[in-house]
Image (cartoon, rainbow, N blue to C red):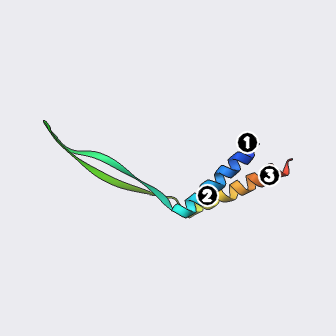
Amino acid sequence: MKPGTIIGIILIALGVAGFALGGFSFTKREKVLDVGPIEATADDKKTVPIPPLLAGLALVSGVVLLAASARKT
């Protein structure tokens, strides 16, 4: 497989995943209190949205790259 084809497939998959999921979330653990042997932590859940414009751009560029790579053969 050509590198252009592989990159095109990856971009298409990322675009579809961006539309399907809409974002991703992760949990960050923060130390709230640390006094001698006593320690308190808090879990903070963060969400990072993926803009539909970015997902659409990845999808379209993947299709264009895949078509251009297939056309050269």
Q: Is residue 61 left or right of residue 40?
A: right
Q: Are marks 3 and 1 in contact (CB under 8 Å)?
A: no
- Quadrant position of residue 35: top left
Pointer 3 residue: 68
Residue 10 position in % (x across, y down): 65, 50
Q: Residue shown at 63%/55% (left/top)?
A: 13
Q: Are marks 1 and 2 in contact (CB under 8 Å)?
A: no
Q: Residue at x 84, y 52 (%)?
A: 71
Q: What amino acid is found at the position of numbered circle 3 in the picture?
A: Ala
Q: Residue at x 52, y 61 (%)?
A: 21
Residue drawn at the location 68% of the way across and 47% of the way down: 7
Q: Amino acid at mark 1?
A: Pro
Q: Which mark is residue 15?
A: 2
Q: Residues within 10 Å of mark 1 (few under 14, many from 20)?
A: few
Circle 2 — which element?
helix
Q: Secondary structure at mark 1?
A: helix
Gap between marks 2 and 3 measured at Cα: 18 Å
- Dot 3 lies on which element? helix
Rendering coords of residue 45 (x, y %):
35, 55
Please name the amino acid that badge 2 sits on. Gly
Neighbourhood count class around disc 2 (C-alpha, 10 Å): few under 14, some 14–19, many 20 upward: many
What number is the disc on residue 3?
A: 1
From this viewpoint, which residue is outermost toward the front?
Answer: 1
